[in-house]
């Protein structure tokens, strides 16, 4: 499943649709809010589900080259984070679902 296919099928709110990542494959789902652990353990084809809504989240996403970031629990995103996601071409989504439920939806969609 690609990032674009996930966006079209799961109903997450699109905060930033990055053209360069639309065709990127999602190979796994990763849930973690501790950025140092996420940075050391997350795979590059992961859909990262987190509640951490800040610039450091985008830095980790960029360093690990994840497929996309899904912000769960309805956390708010400020304009600075949105601008940085656009600048770095990071696909960013949000959902009101809890982290576990959002991750399960993605996992089911990708067959994991």
Image (tube, rainbow, N blue to C red):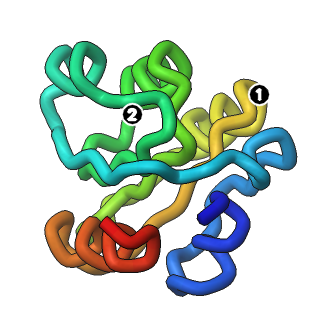
Q: Residues within 10 Å of mark 2 (few under 14, many from 20)?
A: some
- Rendered position, 32 above or below 11: above
Q: Secondary structure at mark 1?
A: helix
Residue appearing at x 55%, y 21% in the figure: 62
Which one is in front, 38 or 78? 38
Q: What residue is shown with label 1?
A: 87
Which percent across, then down, holds residue 111? 38, 72
Horizontally, residue 19 falls left or right of residue 4, namely right
**Residue 100 spot, x, y in % from top left:** 15, 68
Q: Is residue 15 above or below residue 62?
A: below
Please tell me which residue lies in front, 84 or 50. 50
Q: Quadrant of residue 22?
A: bottom right
Query: In percent of the image, x 24 and y 74: which residue is there?
Result: 104
Q: Earlier in the sequence, mark 1 or mark 2?
A: 2
| Residue at the image position 21 percent from the left and 48 percent from the top | 31
For the N terminus, the image quarter is: bottom right
- Would residue 6 appear left or right of 52 to someone viewing this image? right
* Mark 1 Cα-neighbour bin, 10 Å: few <14, some 14–19, many ≥20: few
Q: Nearer the viewer, residue 95 or 32?
A: 32
Q: Residue 11: horizontal and vertical position, in percent?
A: 54, 85
The answer to whether 7 appears left or right of 89 in the picture is left
Mark number displayed over residue 54: 2
């Amino acid at each position: 499943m690609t990032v674009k296919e996930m966006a079209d099928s799961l109903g997450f709110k699109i905060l930033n649709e990055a053209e360069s990542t639309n065709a990127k494959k999602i190979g796994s789902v990763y849930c973690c809010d501790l950025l140092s652990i996420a940075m050391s353990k997350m795979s590059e084809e992961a859909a990262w589900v987190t509640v951490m809504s800040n610039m450091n989240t985008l830095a980790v996403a960029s360093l690990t080259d994840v497929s996309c970031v899904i912000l769960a629990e309805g956390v708010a995103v400020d304009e600075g984070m949105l601008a940085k996601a656009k600048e770095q071409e990071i696909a960013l989504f949000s959902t009101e679902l809890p982290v576990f439920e959002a991750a399960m939806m993605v996992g089911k969609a990708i067959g994991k």
